[in-house]
Image (spheres, helix red, strand yellow):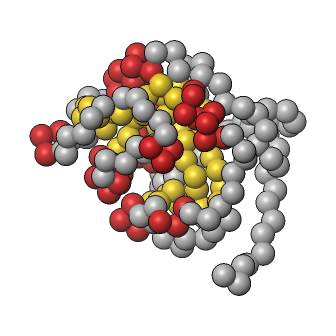
Amino acid sequence: MVDTEPQVADGKVLWHFTMSLDGFVAGPNHSMDWMTGFSIRQGLIGEYVDTTGAVLAGRDGWDAGGDSRPYGGAWHGPIFVLTHHPEDGTPADGVTFLTCDPAEAVRIGLVAAGGKNLEVFSPTIGRQLLELGLIDEIDLHIAPILLGEGIRLYDNPGGAPIRLRQVGAGDPVSVVNVRYRPSAT
């Protein structure tokens, strides 16, 4: 299946990640060095840059990434970092540390997004928002790599399964089939 539907800025809460085939969105200690060397659809980064109005991030990921801006620095806008301890957060331009509940963080982020999308870059916050019914879409780019350990996209031991519906043409409950072979490099 090829992602051919362009992103649109319609004020949705978008839980967005590149993910390894085995379900990790970051390596151990939130490392992201594994994300290089993959190809994506032409123009996709530009679509996200144009349709993203604000970002909601988690504190652990923010601290691990430093003052890195989304999409290789091509996107500029407000970033909200949800944390229990804003007092020791490293200040950065355009970054606000929030100490509210996740639903309030979404409200703040959507207002700041100004009609564009609020992108959620945190597995923990995304899980909480999913449970609250506040995620409009989950947008995953599955990279052909097996990490074996790290930070999972969704981890909810003992929780009920959450069924999803595929966006776009075709059967919305169809299984997505992928096939890979181990690479020599």
Can you say whether 122 is above or below 75 in the image?
A: below
Task: From the viewer's side, name the closer residue of 74 and 9.
Answer: 74
Residue drawn at x 60%, y 19% as measured from the top left: 10
What count of labels does the image hold?
0
Q: Quadrant of the C terminus?
A: bottom right
Query: Does residue 160 appear anywhere in the picture?
Result: no
Q: Looking at the image, which residue sits at the far front?
A: 74
Residue drawn at x 74%, y 37% as measured from the top left: 166
Left or right: 44 in relation to 32? right
Residue drawn at x 48%, y 48% as measured from the top left: 72
Left or right: 45 in relation to 182? left
Q: Position of residue 51 (x, y in %)?
A: 57, 27
Query: Does residue 45 appear anywhere in the picture?
Result: yes
Q: Looking at the image, which residue sits at the far bottom?
A: 184
Task: From the viewer's side, name the closer residue of 177 and 29.
Answer: 29
Residue drawn at x 20%, y 40% as measured from the top left: 91
Q: Looking at the image, which residue sits at the far right?
A: 170
Can you say whether 154 is above or below 86 in the image?
A: below
Residue 99 lies in quadrant: top left
Q: Position of residue 113 (x, y in %)?
A: 45, 21
Task: From the viewer's side, name the closer residue of 7 and 150.
Answer: 7
Residue 102 lies in quadrant: top left
Q: Position of residue 76 (x, y in %)?
A: 42, 32
Left or right: 21 in relation to 97? right
